[in-house]
């Protein structure tokens, strides 16, 4: 890499698909879901070598204490969103805070990357494109016809670094996902981006000026404490809430994709957590005391509890305080209904 890159960690999500473990201030990114460390600390470590500057963490006020506690040893800067305005608003704040020639590497803080070396090599390739004012997204090489992710179609090659984005594809039905996998040239949209701050500023002024101008005003009127910079509430609240994909990427002419296979998962469901968990010979994963009789393929998270399964297959049992979730792992995307009903 030619010069240091500023990592920007988006740390404001609620992670309701991992209810009841993830909720409120104790959101998904601060949990140890796969063993060894929280997802947030794993993200910090991924961007912690000589190629990267100290990270900028964008979070809500309710997460400041946890961010500071879990970021010990990494010396991050904290920029606090007064209200949630989706990824476009958060990225606009980061752009407003940066010099125009700074390269910003934007990452969700609640994903996992098992091959950190492959990740850093992809960032090195993407840097050449970002210096040439391409807004670069990282596409995950698909290994199955996944219907829960958006896809990126690669267009013309941009040297050896990546490809111009031909189009973005919404989460597809299974038949379409199978066809794209068979055709090749498609990757999963991981929501990781690299760009020159000035290039993104210009793109936002063109495609979503209301979002950028609100963020710029919010940063200009920010207040500062010893621990964080707090963007101005009324200014930022004026920003429309939109994703960076809809606000900028699907409209902009210079968007590139760097495909990479790096053991990525968004851990967006209990089913995804089970897929990465350490399982016994019958496919059961448990972080508590488990008796499993003629049961297989189950995920049990019940710290301090003794759980017995009899004749169960492919179910999740998640215990958190007084809340207990029991469901087929295949219904993991429906957890939000319980989270909404139970809080």
Image: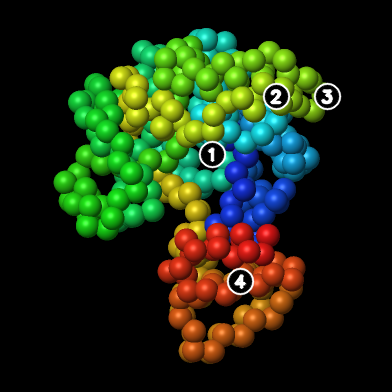
Q: Is residue 76 visible?
A: no
Q: Mark 2 Cα within 10 Å, few/some/many (few <14, many 20+)?
A: some
Q: Are marks 1 and 3 in contact (CB under 8 Å)?
A: no
Image depth: mark 1 or mark 2 in front: 2
x then y, percent, for residue 122? 39, 32
Provide residue 15's location: percent of width, then percent of height: 59, 51
* Residue placed under numbered mark 1 in the picture: 108
> Which residue is label 3 attached to?
226
- Secondary structure beneath disc 1? strand
Q: CA distance from mark 1 to mark 2?
A: 25 Å
- Residue lying at 22% horizontally and 57% vertically, measured from the top left: 175
Q: Quadrant of residue 141?
A: top left
Which secondary structure lies at badge 4?
A: strand
| Residue at the disc numbered 2 | 234
Mark 4 packing: few (<14 Cα in 10 Å), some, or many (20+)? some
Q: Earlier in the sequence, mark 2 or mark 3?
A: 3
Which quarter of the figure is the C terminus placed in?
A: bottom right
Q: How is the image coloured?
A: rainbow
- Circle 2 or circle 3, nearest the eye: 2
Q: Nearer the viewer, mark 4 or mark 1?
A: 4
Residue 277 rendering spot, x and y as whole percentages: 52, 63
Tell me the tag on residue 325.
Answer: 4
Q: CA distance from mark 2 to mark 4?
A: 38 Å
Q: Position of residue 333 (x, y in %)?
A: 47, 61
Residue toward you, 37 or 78? 78
Q: Is residue 154 above or below residue 148?
A: above
| Residue at (70, 51) in percent of width and height | 24
Tell me whether circle 2 and circle 4 mark residues in contact (CB < 8 Å): no
Circles 2 and 3: CB atoms closer than 8 Å:
no
């Amino acid at each position: 890499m030619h010069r240091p890159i500023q990592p920007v960690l988006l740390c404001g999500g609620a992670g309701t698909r991992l209810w009841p473990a993830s909720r409120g201030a104790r959101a998904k990114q601060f949990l140890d879901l796969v063993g060894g460390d929280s997802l947030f600390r794993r993200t910090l470590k991924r961007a912690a070598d000589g190629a990267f500057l100290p990270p900028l963490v964008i979070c809500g006020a309710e997460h400041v204490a946890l961010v500071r506690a879990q970021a010990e040893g990494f010396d991050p800067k904290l920029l606090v969103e007064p209200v949630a305005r989706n990824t476009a608003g958060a990225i606009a704040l980061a752009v407003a805070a940066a010099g125009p020639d700074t390269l910003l590497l934007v990452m969700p803080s609640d994903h996992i990357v098992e091959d950190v070396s492959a990740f850093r090599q992809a960032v090195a390739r993407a840097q050449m494109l970002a210096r040439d004012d391409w807004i670069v997204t990282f596409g995950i090489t698909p290994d199955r016809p996944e219907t829960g992710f958006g896809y990126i179609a690669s267009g013309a090659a941009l040297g050896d670094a990546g490809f111009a984005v031909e189009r973005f594809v919404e989460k597809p039905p299974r038949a379409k996902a199978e066809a794209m996998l068979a055709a090749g040239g498609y990757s999963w949209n991981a929501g990781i981006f690299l760009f020159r701050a000035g290039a993104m500023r210009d793109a936002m002024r063109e495609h979503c000026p209301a979002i950028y101008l609100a963020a710029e005003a919010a940063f200009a009127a920010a207040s500062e404490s010893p621990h964080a910079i707090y963007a101005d509430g009324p200014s930022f609240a004026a920003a429309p809430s939109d994703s960076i994909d809809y606000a900028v990427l699907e409209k902009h002419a210079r968007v590139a994709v760097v495909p990479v296979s790096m053991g990525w998962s968004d851990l967006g469901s209990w089913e995804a957590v089970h897929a990465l968990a350490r399982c016994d010979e019958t496919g059961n994963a448990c972080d508590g005391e488990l008796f499993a009789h003629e049961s297989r393929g189950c995920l049990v998270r019940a710290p301090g509890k003794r759980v017995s399964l009899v004749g169960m297959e492919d179910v999740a049992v998640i215990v958190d305080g007084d809340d207990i979730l029991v469901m087929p792992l295949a219904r993991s995307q429906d957890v939000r209904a319980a989270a909404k009903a139970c809080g």
